Amino acid sequence: MHRTVIHLNEADPAKIQAVLQNTSNLFTALGEEGLQAELVAHGPGITVTTATLAGAFTGPLDDLMSRGLVVCACRNTMTAKGLSSTDLLEGVTIVDSGVAHLVTRQGQGWSYLRP
């Protein structure tokens, strides 16, 4: 089982597309049973987790989540931007600190990916 934590802290649509495509490629290459993956969004990247701002990325995110991707939103960023859990896409998990979650996962032996 491969465990990978994916870092997203940018709102640029091309960057978000690259992150989602790389994540899809991981699931295709390793299989849903062979990959445990988390996408951690913080800072400007939080937009991909919100129902009103995810836009065209909602479908691809839903697909990846159905394949096993866990999408994590940073509570610190949410607080700074005045967001609540009701603003998030269904199924998004809230972590207290996005950067702390990334560091914790790496300390647990997870691979780090920042496309």
Image (cartoon, grey):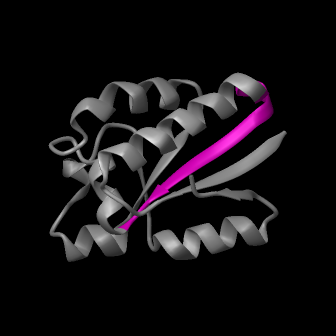
Locate residue 58, reporting x and y percent: 31, 31
Is any atom of residue 70 visible in this view?
A: yes
Q: Residue at x 26, y 54 (%)?
A: 85
Of residues 97 and 53, the one nearer the viewer is: 53
Of residues 42 and 85, the one nearer the viewer is: 42
Quadrant location of the N terminus in the rendered image? top right
Marker count (numbered): 0
Magenta span includes 112: no
Q: Residue at x 19, y 62 (%)?
A: 83
Quadrant of res 74: bottom left
In the image: residue 79, left or right of residue 62 = left
Locate residue 35, reporting x and y percent: 74, 36
Is any atom of residue 92 visible in this view?
A: no
In the image: residue 28, left or right of residue 65 = right
Among all residues in the image, which is located at the extreme front?
Answer: 14
Q: Residue at x 58, y 49 (%)?
A: 38
Locate residue 77, reporting x and y percent: 31, 71
In the image: residue 87, left or right of residue 113 = left
